[in-house]
Amino acid sequence: MANAPEITGLEQVPVDQTVNEKSGKEYADIGHVERVLSGNEDLKDHMDLSRIDAEVAKYTSDVREIISEEESNRLLKLIDRRVLVIMILTYFLQAIDKGTLSFASIMGIEPDLHLVGQDYSWLITGVYIAILIVEYPTNWIITKVPIAKYLSFNIICWGAVLACHAAATNFTTILVCRILLGIFEAACQPSFIILSSMWFKREEQTARVTYWYMMNGAQQVVGGLLAYCFTLIGRDKVIKSWQALFIAYGVISVFWGIFVGWWMPDSPMRAKCFSEDDKRKMIERVRSNQTGMQSRVFRKEQMIEGLKDPQTWCYCLIAICTTLPTSGLGGFANIIIKSFNFETLQVQLLAMVLGFYIIIVLFASIWLVKKTNQNLLVMAGFVVPSFIGTIVLMTVESKSMATKVGLLFSYYLTLSFWSAQTLALSMISRNIAGQTKKATVVACNFIAWSVGNSIGPQVFLKWDAPRYFIAFATHLGCYTLLMFVIAFLRWWLLRENKKKDQLAAAGIREAADDNMTHAFEDLTDRENPNFRYRYRSAGNSTFLFIVRPSYEPLN
């Protein structure tokens, strides 16, 4: 007979086994679990204030307030204008700053800095090794300090470092710049994951994460156009074209960082730009997330749970399987396209088309998720074109205009798997609860993200150019593993939801708490029996709350 799902903080007392016998052998022991509130079962359950952050407690109660759809939409617009816009533009700058080296690669930076062999690959890898080293400390800091101010500080620093790239004279000096760039950029994505879970409802997070993540495509468009303009400067000026590129982007980032520190609120509780009533409602509207809001307390047991959770390692594998191809395809984008026998200026402009394609893919993934209510199946579907594009690049040579165009299209096709990255990030913000656990999982995810990005450029070997068979074969292996991980993650989340539904069927009050009394307590997704995982979007689900059918559908 299987053990009952682990529910932390609940006392166990014998109850009637009839329900469990009808539920099947696997859940026969679930009926033993019931929370004992007091001698009087009519007394209402209350929040545990010891597990709620003091700032959050000022704006919440154990009574759920129903916010109308009209009012919720009004608040969402306020949040989008104040928070989402900052996230989108900040990520755009980070993406374009990272992508600057790719554009500089065909503007003369290699001969000017005497780069040979794998030197260029190490300049890409250096950024991600730095992120790998500082990722956990950065995530720990994010949970302890005002998040917007910390983000602002890092933007200013990475802008200054980016501008310093122009002063590099050899491989060593520019590698130091790349490492410093990685250290300061490490705070960006983890901050956005935390901000997404803090400001937006779970059904809103997929679209919001995708909006800022698609700036990877936007930077290809804008970056390609600007790089084209900077290329016209030529190589015989006092400041070479690639140097002007680094200086311009660096200065813009510094000024943007200053603006972020002034404009962006650290949290709904500290948002001076909103009224007290709006702040209370903004916090209340995300009660249904049940992922908590904020906590400065480090809980060792949550960290251990995060490291043991199969979700964590699924998200890590997804990160590695997507970033390993991404970093190589992104860092070598212009070199690969140029190998199809296009001219330098043509390559700069064709990079813009790549950006448009990425944006189309990400918009299409949002649309399909909304229509089908299937996050993970949509992720898997977008990996299939990447298989096709990669196989074509490995088997077809550029011998004519027709094959040149076909190879270019196939290269674009390989980037289809980017939607898997985006949708996986949104699942982390929706499915991981408990502030220490969330920081741990986010840190693990971005450590894996850094590992993939570090390895990616190294599989593009100089002697394997221009076809890069080894690199593309490695990518095929990543796509294959990715499909297996997606299938396992969907099965595991479905199984965990079924277990919690069985608790509700067994009469466990907290597994069917319509009031969501404990939503703001610093409980993990496994400690909170009322938490349900979302492997689908916000649409209808096959799993409805068993005890109270009037509940919102499980997703």
Image: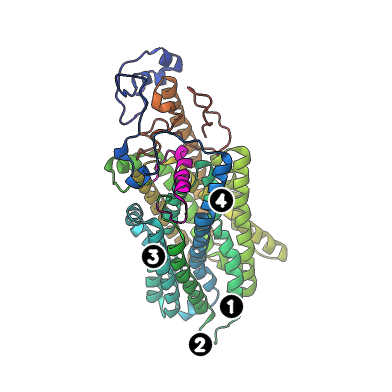
* Residue range of the region highlighted in magenta in the rendering: 270-293
Quote the CA–CA distance across marks 3 and 4: 26 Å
Quote the CA–CA distance across marks 1 and 4: 40 Å
Q: Give the quadrant of the N terminus.
A: top left
Q: Which mark's residue is nearer the viewer, 1 or 3?
A: 3
* Residue wearing tag 3: 153
Q: What SS does tag 1 mark?
A: helix
The amino acid sitting under disc 4 is Lys
**Mark earlier in primary sequence (1, 2):** 1
* Residue wearing tag 1: 231
Query: Circles 1 and 3: CB distance less than 8 Å?
Result: no
Q: Is residue 380 visible?
A: no
* Residue wearing tag 4: 77
* Residue wearing tag 2: 238
Quote the CA–CA distance across marks 4 and 2: 47 Å
Quote the CA–CA distance across marks 1 and 2: 14 Å
Query: Circles 4 and 2: CB distance less than 8 Å?
Result: no
Q: Please, is residue 524 above or below residue 366 in the view?
A: above
Q: Which mark's residue is nearer the viewer, 1 or 4?
A: 4
The amino acid sitting under disc 3 is Phe
Q: Is residue 414 left or right of residue 15?
A: right
Query: Circles 3 and 4: CB distance less than 8 Å?
Result: no
Q: Which mark's residue is nearer the viewer, 2 or 3?
A: 3
